[in-house]
Image (cartoon, rainbow, N blue to C red):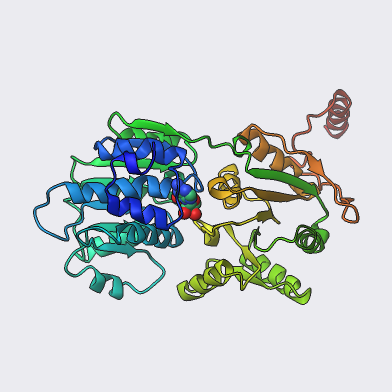
Amino acid sequence: MSFESSGLSSALVRATRERGYLEPTAIQAQAIPAVLKGLDVLGSAQTGSGKTAAFALPILQRLLDLPRDRPRQVRALLLVPTRELAAQVGDTLRHFAQYLPEPLKIAVLFGGVSINPQMMGLRGGADIVVATPGRLLDLLDHNALRIDEVGVLVLDEADRLLDLGFAEELNRILGQLPARRQNLFFSATFPPVVQGLADQLLRDPVRIEVPLAPETQPDILQRAIEVDTAKRTPLLRHLIKEHGWTRVLVFVATKYATELVTHKLGLAGIHAHAFHGELSQGARTQVLADFKASRVQVVVATDVAARGIDVARLPAVVNYDLPRSPVDYVHRIGRTGRAGQSGVAVSFITADAEAHFRLIEKRQGVRVPREQVPGFERVEVAAPVLDAHGGVKGQRPSKKDKLRAAAARSRGG
Ligand code: AMP
């Protein structure tokens, strides 16, 4: 299938061309016809698969084709987990909508910024709303919009929506939607709660699977480098220099670490910027713009802040600290090697992180060979993890241990 033969109008095809899309990606080739037919879709796909256009294009087409009672009633609602993703999805929709014969109003609503401009922006209605659940509910509570005429609902990154604790908000929102509607559900992973939500929402969905596991994406090379905790910043500097990475997204565990690593890179003359949840929306937008324009070489981010970052041609992602969950790992490394471009995802494996990385590998069903970089070899050993009884976790007591314990008990008792 090509964009021309996909059933999209020439105005939409023209906008895809201008965005540099030549051929539909796998998920686009499958989702576009299904959405145009009005079917529900269950998409197993992560960021980087082209899923945004996979729902944005056919939704715009359907809004044009389907009759409506009055203009500017919300007919498509797209729920996303983060403000960055909301902004990106909004931008994508606006780009694709630019040549449509009649203008569509697209409202983008997210928290962390003042609610008033968003309320003003909703005066006179909107055709499409892209929102994070919390802010949408606030605006619904203020009667700033109505969603009882929504014909298409999209849940994007459903696993993250639930990860971030939006289950209750989602239920309240679903309660305000009309029962008859088309549902499009996208998620990178399907743990039981996500599957449960999908089962609740979807009716005979068309199932589209774009392989999740990064090992099936030859364009992302996963590397695991053993290193001591204190040698991570020097190793990072070394890798940046050695590989000539022009843009690197570095993940750390805390806001404090974003600032510390940024500072240390700065001392070495590398232009880095911290990116965490406490930056104002304006500051975040500025950092991303500088990153995209190559004014900043390294962005050091926490998971929360980095959700949904979409920077084209990101050659490298570095897990300076490992993410807490395997889901986050998949999302992190999905920031590189996007849409057919190759990328590398490097994880720093300190002795203490080894066991956790093994879990991440297990969940993905891959094994990433451990590497040592000369001059940065790991010498630390893992601190034993004590269980509740003061024993070493994961280590069963040997026969000898048991005998000793029994002897101690009989001596004491
Ligand atoms: P997404 O998975 O929607 O976040 O898209 C990942 C990246 O792929 C974005 O930078 C898109 O602009 C790009 N992209 C999406 N579809 C295509 C396509 N058909 N051809 C080339 N690039 C695309």
Q: Which quarter of the rendering shows the N terminus?
A: top left
Front residue of 179/71: it is 71
In depth, the one of 20 and 290 nearer the eye is: 20
Closer to us: 18 or 255: 18
Q: Can residue 365 be seen in this view?
A: yes
Residue drawn where x is 27% and y is 35% of the image: 39
Q: Residue furthest top?
A: 399
Q: In this view, does 132 lie to the left or right of 269?
A: left
Image quarter where the C terminus lies is top right
Q: Residue at x 59, y 60 (%)?
A: 302
Q: Is residue 355 above or below residue 161?
A: above
At 25% across and 51% down in the image, what residue appears? 76
Q: Position of residue 399 (x, y in %)?
A: 86, 23
How far across and down, in percent of the image, does residue 289 sit?
Answer: 52, 70
Q: Is residue 165 above or below residue 360?
A: below
* Number of numbered discs overlaid on the protein picture: 0
Percent position (x, y) of residue 388? 70, 42
Q: Can residue 162 be seen in this view?
A: no
Residue 35 percent location from the top left of the image: 29, 39
Direction from residue 25 to residue 104 in the image, left or right: left
* Quadrant in the picture for residue 366: top right
Instruction: Please report the residue visible at 75 percent of the width from the left and 34 percent of the height from the top.
Output: 394
